Each structure stands twice: as C-alpha cells, then as structure tokens.
Image (cartoon, rainbow, N blue to C red):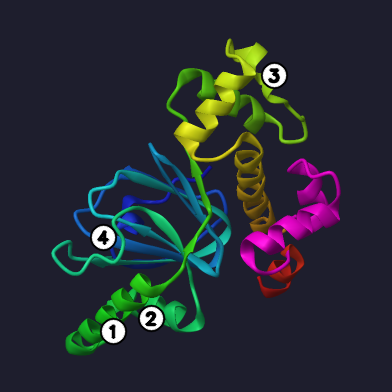
C-alpha cells in the first residue's frame, strides 16, 4: 500500500488519492469532517472503523487518535473546526451527505478560494448542517475481550466461510453463550448483526475498486447476489449497481 504524506492529513485539505492509500495514525486539536466525493474513505481508531462512500461523511472529534484508509481512486476533502466552537457531534460518527452538505464541505475544504468573511459564514452553515444530518449505521466496533477479538479475526479472515458461534467458541476457548454475551455487551450487536456489518463494510471497499456486484456478493459471503443487493439497499438506500453507475 502506498503511504501518502502527513500533509494530506492536515485538518483542512483536498486531495486526489489512489486506491490503497493511507494516512498514519495521528490526532488533531480541531474537530474534523472527512468526506470522499469519489471513492471510499475509512477512519480507524482503537474503538473501531467508520466507512464512508461518496454519499456519506465521517465526523472526527478533537483529540481522537485515528488513521485513514482509502479504497478506489478517491477525492478526499476534510474541514477542521476549532474545539471551542459549537460541537454538533461528541463522538466519531458517519452521517448522510445530501447535495447541500456535499457542496458546503467541498467549498470549505479549499479555503484559499474564498474571502475570510464568506468562508466563516459557510463554515457556520456547514456546522449547523452536520448537526442536523442523520447518523448512519456504518461503524464496525472493535472487540476488547481477547476471546472476542480472536473470534472476530477468524470471521474476518475469509467471509465465504460460515462460522457458528459454537464453532468459534471451540476455536477461542469460550462457550457459545459467552461469545453471544460478549457480542451484545462489547459491540452492542448480535453475532449475525455484526457479521452483516462486516460484510457491508467489506462490500463497500470492493465496490470502490470496481469489482462486479456478483463478485462482491460472493467474496463477502452472501448466499446470492439478490440477497446482497437487498441488504445493501436497506442499509444505504440504493443498490450496489447504482453505486457503480454513479462512480
């Protein structure tokens, strides 16, 4: 994977990145909104991963140690906000991006093109719209318990392999009941819900790399392409084929 310069990890910036690029773990004293107008951007912290295609953005609160990964050719925008200003979100979160929010982020991520007073007004509107945008369930939380971490790693290694909780428990030294409890208490999801989130996360990465929808469905472990399309549409509001046509 190519490693892009830390300058692109600056609080406010715009850049074009090849698929497979990443920015090492760092933190900012400012809040930050991260948006890919093309491609897919992922933010990783010790608490988990957040992923955003071109109709989603990721809010990163000040002081949060994070890293970025990019899938497919990506046009990357980020805008910073001073921490003493209104804070629309206290935790990292994926939000929906409508056409207005998209244009505000793009305009504010290239501040040299705008007079200072106009930029200040746009940034305040942008903050207001971020606070009003709906939260999207595109987070993949990280396990803390060692047994749960190992179980998750087994599933992540090959999504085409179907693991039951009983089988995972045998591999990591935990009962089915214990693993089920850990999924609920640590990840706030059942095992099937977490596995679906993982598959969607991986599917967005593969779609950004222009793989056919049928191939993505197979690699992510869905029983059929139609089952994948149905889950994807319910989660993101459009079909994976529509994603290909747009991007």
Image position, residue 18 (x, y; %) = 54, 57
Which residue: 43% across, 78% down? 101
Label 1 or label 2, whichever comes before in sequence order: 2
Which residue: 70% across, 58% down? 232
**Residue 31 badge:** 4
Q: Is residue 37 left or right of residue 30?
A: right
Residues at marks 3 and 2 touching, judged by CB atoms closer than 8 Å: no
Mark 3 sits on what residue? 166
Q: CA distance from mark 3 to mark 4?
A: 42 Å
Residues at marks 4 and 1 touching, judged by CB atoms closer than 8 Å: no
Q: Is residue 118 left or right of residue 15?
A: left
Image position, residue 234 (x, y; %) = 68, 62
Residues at marks 1 and 2 touching, judged by CB atoms closer than 8 Å: yes
Q: CA distance from mark 1 to mark 2?
A: 7 Å
Label 3 or label 2, whichever comes before in sequence order: 2
Front residue of this view, candidates 187 and 24: 187
């Amino acid at each position: 994977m190519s490693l892009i310069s830390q300058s692109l990890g600056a609080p406010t910036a715009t850049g074009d990145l090849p698929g497979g690029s990443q920015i090492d773990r760092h933190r900012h004293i400012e809040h930050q909104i991260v948006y890919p107008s093309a491609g897919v951007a992922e933010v990783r912290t010790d608490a988990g991963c957040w992923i955003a295609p071109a109709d989603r953005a990721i809010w990163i609160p000040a002081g949060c140690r994070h890293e970025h990964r990019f899938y497919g050719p990506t046009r990357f925008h980020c805008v910073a906000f001073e921490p003493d200003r209104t804070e629309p979100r206290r935790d990292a979160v994926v939000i929906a991006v409508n056409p207005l929010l998209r244009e505000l982020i793009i305009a504010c991520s290239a501040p040299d093109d705008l007079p200072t007073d106009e930029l200040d007004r746009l940034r305040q509107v942008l903050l207001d719209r971020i606070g009003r945008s709906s939260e999207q369930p595109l987070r993949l939380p990280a396990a803390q318990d060692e047994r749960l971490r190992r179980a998750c790693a087994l599933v992540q290694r090959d999504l085409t392999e179907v693991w039951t909780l009983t089988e995972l428990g045998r591999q990591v030294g935990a009962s089915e009941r214990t693993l089920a409890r850990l999924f609920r208490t640590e990840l706030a999801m059942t095992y099937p819900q977490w596995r679906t989130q993982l598959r969607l996360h991986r599917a967005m990465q593969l779609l950004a790399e222009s793989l056919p929808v049928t191939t993505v469905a197979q690699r992510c472990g869905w029983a059929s392409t139609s089952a994948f399309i149905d889950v994807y549409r319910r989660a993101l509001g459009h079909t994976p084929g529509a994603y290909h046509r747009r991007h």
